[in-house]
Image: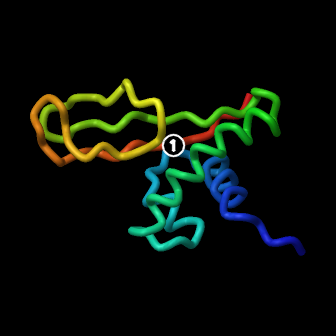
Amino acid sequence: MVEETVRERIIRVLMESRTPLSAREIAELVGLDPVRGEAEVYEHLRHIAKTLRRRYGGRAVLYMVPPRCRSCGYVFSDLTEPRRPSRCPRCKSERIEPPRFYIDVD
C-alpha cells in the first residue's frame, strides 16, 4: 500500500468534511502537531489550490471562509493567501477567528 502524502491527506480531510475547517483542526486530523503544524498547513494549502485545478480540471475548488475579528466583527475579505492575521486593522484586537477551508467538488 502506498502511503499518502501530507497534502493528499489534507485534500481527503477537506473533501470528507461536512463543515469548513481551520488550519489547526486540519493539522490535528492529518496527524501533525496542532500548534507547529498550523503554519505547515497554510503552506500546503497554497499548493493544494494549484493541485486541485490541475488534477480535477477546475471541478474541485479550495475555498476559504475569511477570518473575522471577534471583538468588532471586521471580516478580512481582502486576503489573497491562506493565513491567520495577527490583529484587526479596525480595533487592533488580537482576538481573530481563524480562516476556515473547504473543498467544493462539482
Q: Could you say where residue 46 lies in the image, as x and y percent from the top left?
A: 58, 43
Taking 92 as reference, is 75 left or right? right
Could you tell me which residue is drawn at 28 percent across and 36 percent down?
A: 68
Name the residue furthest left. Answer: 91
Judge whether 19 appears above or below 27 on screen. Answer: above
Label 1 CA crowd tier, 10 Å (few <14, some 14–19, many 20+):
many
Residue 33, position as x, y percentages in the image:
47, 73
Residue depicted at x 74% and y 28%: 106
What colour scheme was applied to this rendering of the protein? rainbow
Residue 77 image position (x, y, % from top left) = 36, 25
Nearest the camera: 15 or 82? 82
Can you name the residue that lies furthest to the right here?
Answer: 1
Of residues 18 and 23, the one nearer the viewer is 23
How many numbered marks are there? 1
Left or right of residue 92: residue 16 = right
Along the viewing direction, whichever of 71 and 53 lies nearer the viewer: 53
In the displayed structure, would residue 9 be above or below residue 75? below
Task: Identify the residue shown where x is 25% and y is 47%.
Answer: 86
Q: Based on the displayed image, in which of its 4 quarters is residue 78 positioned? A: top left
Compared with 101, 27 (above or below) is below
x%, y% of residue 97? Answer: 29, 45
Q: Which residue type carries mark 1?
A: Phe
The residue drawn where x is 18% and y is 48% is 95
Secondary element at tag 1: strand
Q: Which residue is mark 1?
A: 101
The quadrant of the image that shows the N terminus is bottom right
